[in-house]
Image: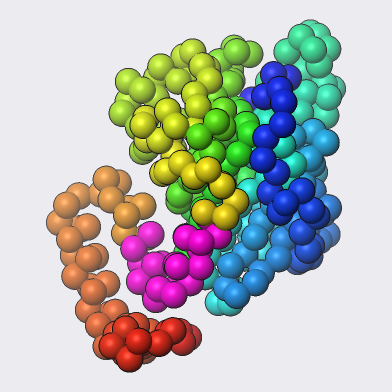
């Protein structure tokens, strides 16, 4: 998990016009009590769930409370049929600056917060990360789940990246289905700087997005890449001069698509490459058979020919 010690200097575009967005509170899940904290701003409008990391004074650096709030926010959206798309962004000057050294100083061995970051562990007991490293029966620990939960959602998840996405912040963005980035955004697999590896599902996500040699170079060097280069490499989907408005426009377009087609499309594409061709092709055929003539498929077709907005169930 990366750190926020080195961040972009100067002003970068802030989401929501620099204003605090409405807070939606939902009960925590995964056995973790309590509502989504003030570390996350969450509201659902017109089928779009806006999830905003909310530590602008720390450039949304990751501490224990933010990890938990991200997971709780994602878990709270599962099974909510009113949510058709999720837009994940960061308040203030950047998307996420990575691990907050000061919050994990007690876990770092042999030095203070300015000397090295906390050592991570994937053990069920949490190891040096304590509660953050506990899997609690999942395939992920809490830090990994902050990235993986977005892939567990059936709906498309769009990360809107401005400013910096460093270390763990980049891995959270990689957990989304799509990434729209500012051209001058700065992204890095920053763990290399601290003698660590990207342990928040990063090794899995990187190799599904970029060629293996590119993933290795980024992981070995931790070099900074711009938003423009990130698109060229495959780390990001596309650049936008306004990385707040563009994801919202895309989300609004996706709300007008059949939620069944979106869910099955995401599922099939995520499974591609994890199983044999015969199994994948069979799943395609069976899925197509289940969609043809279904209420939402009929509605999509009728709405197109009648030149009106669809009304999906």
- The residue shown at (81%, 16%) is 113
- The residue shown at (74%, 34%) is 59
Query: As drawn, is 307 to the left or to the right of 72?
Result: left
Query: As drawn, is 207 to the left or to the right of 225?
Result: left
Q: Position of residue 153 (x, y in %)?
A: 52, 60
- For the question of whether residue 283 can be seen, the reply is yes
- Rendered view: 309 above or below 203: below
- For the question of whether residue 29 can be seen, the reply is no
Q: Position of residue 269 (x, y in %)?
A: 32, 54
Magenta residue span: 247-266
- The residue shown at (62%, 31%) is 164
Magenta span: chief secondary structure: helix
Residue 36 located within the stretch drawn in magenta: no
- Rendered view: 220 above or below 313: above
**Residue placed most toward the observer, 19 or 206:** 19
**Residue placed most toward the observer, 249 or 159:** 249
Q: Position of residue 18 (x, y in %)?
A: 76, 48
Number of marks in picture: 0
Q: Position of residue 272 (x, y in %)?
A: 28, 50
């Amino acid at each position: 998990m990366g750190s926020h010690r080195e961040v972009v200097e100067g002003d970068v575009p802030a989401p929501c016009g620099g204003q605090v967005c409405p807070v939606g509170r939902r009960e925590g899940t995964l056995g973790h009590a309590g509502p989504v904290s003030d570390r996350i701003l969450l509201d659902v409008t017109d089928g779009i769930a806006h999830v905003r990391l909310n530590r602008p004074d720390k450039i949304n650096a990751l501490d224990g409370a933010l990890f938990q709030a991200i997971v709780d926010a994602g878990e709270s959206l599962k099974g909510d049929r009113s949510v058709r798309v999720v837009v994940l962004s960061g308040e203030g000057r950047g998307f996420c600056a990575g691990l907050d050294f000061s919050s994990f100083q007690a876990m770092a061995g042999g030095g203070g917060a300015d000397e090295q970051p906390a050592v991570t562990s994937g053990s069920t007991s949490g190891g040096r990360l304590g509660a953050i490293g506990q899997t609690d029966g999942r395939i992920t620990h809490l830090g990994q789940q902050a990235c993986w939960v977005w892939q567990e959602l059936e709906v498309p998840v769009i990360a809107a990246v401005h400013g910096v996405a460093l270390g763990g912040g980049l891995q959270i963005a990689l957990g989304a289905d799509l990434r729209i980035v500012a051209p001058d955004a700065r992204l890095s697999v920053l763990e290399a700087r601290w003698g660590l590896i990207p342990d928040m599902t990063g090794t899995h996500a990187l190799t599904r997005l970029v060629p293996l040699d590119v993933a290795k170079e980024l992981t070995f060097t931790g070099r900074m890449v711009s938003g423009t280069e990130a698109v060229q490499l495959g780390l990001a989907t596309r650049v936008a001069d306004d990385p707040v408005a563009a994801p919202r426009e895309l989300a609004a377009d996706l709300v007008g698509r059949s939620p069944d087609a979106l869910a099955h499309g995401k599922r099939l594409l995520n499974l591609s490459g994890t199983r044999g061709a015969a199994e994948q092709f069979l799943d395609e055929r069976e899925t197509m058979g289940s969609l043809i003539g279904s209420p939402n498929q009929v509605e999509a077709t009728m709405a197109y020919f009648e030149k009106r907005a669809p009304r999906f169930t």
